[in-house]
Amino acid sequence: MKDGSFNLFRISVLAAFVILSPTLVNEARGQDGSLFATTAVESNLKERFRLTNIDLRVLRPKIRSQNEELILTLGKCIEAETMVYMSLWDKLRMDRETFEAQDLIGLSPRQMKALRTARLDTESEVANEWVAEYLQVLNSSLDLDWLQTQYVTQIFQKEAQQRLDLLGTMDARARISEYEWRKLAAARDDSLRSALTPQQIRDYDSMATQVTGPLIAF
């Protein structure tokens, strides 16, 4: 999803409108057969994996469907009444399990590898946009100073990459354990503890973002 295939900021805004407007969905689908064009993605995959035209005919509807699904998931999480940080990550993990169990059936090994790559690229773009959106909310809610902002950004970006790495290891037989998934949140909280004041930690807990319990027991 790199190579200029789409501008994520515009996509996230569009996704928000799509959630509120079924008419827009129908119009977008009517224009090019899909909510979001994937021509650049397909071209990149064709070159990387030496896909044939037959391969692309098989993969094209799957790529378009999963892109639409992931981008709309991002829009729904952003537009939710409360931005719960783990909401998008847990949905990505759950949807990846479904993808590995169902969406690869009947594909050749090369087609499987190409479709997994396309999905991980889109997951990465969606996750990066989600982290950026969440950090804006966090910055405003906690009134972080410049140094705190830089440090907290690094913490969340590091965790995001670790989660994406875990998603990339999944297949039909290998799933992410609950322990592996949740220990990343615990590590993030440990790091945040050194960057935030006690009041900021209380405010952070009140944002209902925690899945591992409050940072400090009061």
Image: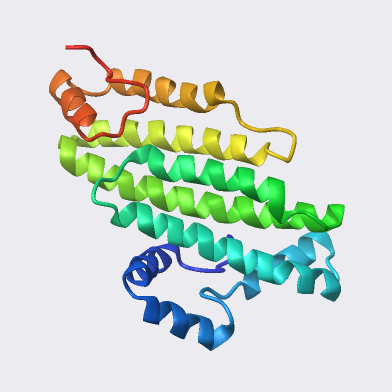
Q: Is residue 21 above or below residue 46?
A: below
Quadrant assignment, res 135: top left
How was this image coloured? rainbow
Q: How many marks are shown on the rendered structure?
A: 0
Q: Nearer the viewer, residue 148 or 161?
A: 161
Q: Nearer the viewer, residue 153 or 141?
A: 141
Residue in the picture at 32% in, 29% down: 210
Residue in the picture at 83% in, 58% down: 106
Residue 17 vs residue 143: left or right?
Answer: right
Residue in the picture at 68% in, 38% down: 170
Residue 95 in the image, given as x and y percentages of width and height: 56, 48
Q: Is residue 32 above or below residue 110?
A: below
Residue 15 in the image, given as x and y percentages of width and height: 39, 66
Residue 143 in the image, given as x and y percentages of width and height: 15, 37
Quick one: which residue is furthest to the bottom in this view? Answer: 31
Quadrant assignment, res 172: top right
Residue in the picture at 55% in, 24% down: 180
* Quadrant position of the C terminus in the picture: top left
Residue 94 in the image, given as x and y percentages of width and height: 54, 43
* Quadrant position of the N terminus in the picture: bottom right
Residue 113 vs residue 91: left or right?
Answer: right
Q: Is residue 68 above or below residue 202?
A: below
Q: Nearer the viewer, residue 27 or 9?
A: 27
Q: Is residue 121 above or below residue 25?
A: above
